Image: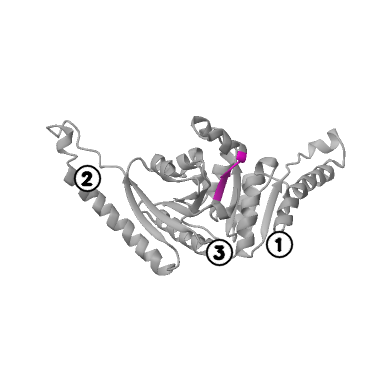
């Protein structure tokens, strides 16, 4: 997966401040990487009155004129957002679209293999990891393409480091994409790997256990970084080894970052709801935008 293979960002918008923030981030990212931006609003028609208060066929409620009037109102809203961002980023090709359909399914269906999907996130911390929103959570669970979740409230810098979670070979796609973004931004790549050590293991096994585990983890990280540094010899790499929990470690380092990149082992479909929980929790708590990248094996499985 190469950053240069992508041509556009598809941004799900719905008139909310979170979606507007996601659109602004996408346009700024597109400006840096010579990408186009599609602002897409998926529209569901209003629920008709109940049968207790409404007489006549349902077709009398969903008249063609009513549908068109509703779509026109939504088009005006998306066009206004597009014009606002065109003024800020005149070099970016920004289009506005409105389609009928369920938001999550529609966004996933129209996002092509050379596009990255971008969605907004309400809230900031605490239990918000469970409150990503049904559309954002469904997109993260089922999209085959990389997904960026942009927090409405956060603390990130466009020139901050690109933080990437690294654990094993399953992180390769995320690591390589993060390195490409960091290189093009002329900023630091900050790979973070986590080793959790239980103090009771010292007496049970060996006093040197923490040292041995740390050395082994750094050796694995160095092996994964070797092809990255060969491909980007001028890239500054600040590798970090943390004793703790992956979610907490990456959320802590998201403050001031330009982007957090994580891999996902989720396989889409219904199983996607049970897998990749770490990625979704990071996306729900990060202070910086989070890019969730499917592993190559997962993408092949889904194809």
First to last magenta residue range: 291-296
* Residue 236: image tag: 1
Residue 185: x and y in percent read 60, 63
Whichever of callouts 1 and 3 sits on the residue coming sooner in the sequence is 3
Q: Is 266 placed left or right of 169 in the picture?
A: left
Mark whose residue sits in front, 1 or 3: 1
Q: CA distance from mark 3 to mark 2?
A: 40 Å
Residue 211 lies in the magenta-colored region? no
Counting every numbered tag in the picture gives 3
Q: Pointer 3: what residue?
A: 158
Whichever of callouts 1 and 2 sits on the residue coming sooner in the sequence is 2
Q: Nearer the viewer, residue 236 or 302?
A: 302
Residue 75: x and y in percent read 29, 54
Residue 288: x and y in percent read 55, 56
**Which residue is rendered at x = 53% and y = 64% of the image?**
32
- Judge whether 244 appears above or below 29 on screen: above
**Which element type, helix, strand or loop, lies under badge 3?**
loop
Q: Pointer 2: what residue?
A: 67
Whichever of callouts 3 and 2 sits on the residue coming sooner in the sequence is 2
* Residue 278: image tag: none
Q: Quadrant of residue 201?
A: top right
């Amino acid at each position: 997966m190469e950053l240069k293979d992508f041509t556009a960002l598809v941004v799900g918008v719905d008139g909310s401040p979170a979606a507007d923030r996601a659109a602004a981030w996408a346009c700024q990212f597109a400006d840096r990487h010579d990408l186009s931006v599609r602002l897409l609003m998926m529209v569901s028609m209003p629920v008709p009155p109940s049968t207790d208060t409404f007489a006549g066929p349902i077709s009398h409620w969903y008249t063609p004129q009513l549908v068109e009037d509703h779509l026109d109102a939504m088009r005006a809203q998306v066009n206004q957002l597009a014009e606002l961002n065109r003024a800020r980023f005149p070099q970016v090709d920004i289009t506005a679209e409105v389609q009928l359909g369920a938001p999550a399914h529609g966004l996933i269906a129209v996002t092509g293999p050379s596009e990255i999907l971008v969605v907004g996130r309400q809230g900031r911390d605490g239990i918000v990891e469970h409150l990503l929103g049904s559309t954002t959570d469904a997109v993260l669970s089922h999209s085959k393409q990389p997904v960026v979740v942009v927090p409405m409230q956060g603390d990130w810098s466009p020139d901050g480091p690109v933080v990437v979670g690294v654990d094993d070979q399953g992180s390769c796609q995320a690591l390589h994409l993060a390195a490409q973004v960091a290189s093009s931004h002329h900023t630091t790549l900050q790979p973070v790997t986590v080793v959790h050590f239980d103090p009771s293991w010292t007496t049970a096994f060996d006093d040197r256990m923490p040292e041995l585990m740390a050395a082994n983890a750094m050796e694995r990280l160095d092996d994964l970084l070797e092809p990255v540094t060969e491909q980007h010899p001028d890239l500054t790499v600040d590798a970090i080894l943390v004793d703790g929990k992956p979610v907490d470690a990456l959320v802590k380092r998201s403050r001031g970052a330009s982007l957090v990149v994580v891999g996902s082992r989720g396989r889409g479909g219904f199983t996607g709801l049970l897998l990749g929980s770490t990625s979704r929790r990071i996306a729900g708590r990060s202070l910086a935008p989070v890019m969730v990248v499917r592993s190559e094996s997962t993408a092949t499985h889904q194809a």
